[in-house]
Image (cartoon, helix red, strand yellow):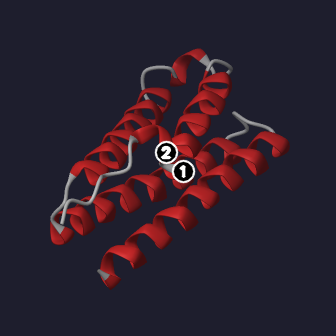
Amino acid sequence: MYKPRRTESKLVIYQKYVDLIEYSYNLLIKYPKYEKYALVSEIRRTMYNSLRYILYANKISDKYSRISILGKLDAEISMMGFFVRFSYKNKYINTNNYYTWSKKIEEIGRILGGWIKSCLKE
């Protein structure tokens, strides 16, 4: 039986991640100039890789391949959490930015955990 795939616009994790990218870009502009080609570029790379994994996982129908990609996505999201903590400790972002940014990442992590659980039940 044909089972239609969810489109990107209907994926909650996709929408939340796009919101995270938009929020992050506003913060990354304020980073010091000497971090633009190091930390800022790593954060952007991680964000784009994560978005790529979300899109890949949505398109793949094989359960084991999808779980593998979701595992990579989980690692990238953990890296984002590290970058946010590192930025806060080095005072590149303030407390409010840290709190908001980390909450967005946590929410995406919870959604991802639910997605992984649903894949394991299939």
- Front residue of 100 and 42: 100
Picture layout, residue 48 above or below residue 33: below
Label annotation for residue 33: none
Dividing the picture into quadrants, the one containing residue 101 is top right
Q: Is residue 17 left or right of residue 32?
A: left
- Front residue of 14 and 69: 14
Residue at (31%, 52%) from the top-left corner?
5
- Front residue of 111 and 42: 111
Q: Amino acid at mark 2?
A: Lys
- In which quadrant will I find the N terminus? bottom left
Dividing the picture into quadrants, the one containing residue 33 is top right
Could you classify mark 1 by the number of other residues whose Cα lies within 10 Å: few (under 14), some (14-19), or many (20 or more)? Answer: few
Picture layout, residue 19 above or below residue 112: above
**Marks 1 and 2, Cα distance to the nearest angstrom?**
6 Å
Label 1 element class: helix
Residue 31 horizontal/vertical position (percent): 64, 23
Residue at mark 2: 10
Residue 44 horizontal/vertical position (percent): 44, 31
Residue at mark 1: 12
Q: Amino acid at mark 1?
A: Val
Residue at (20%, 59%) from the top-left corner?
2
Q: Is residue 31 visible?
A: no
How many numbered callouts?
2
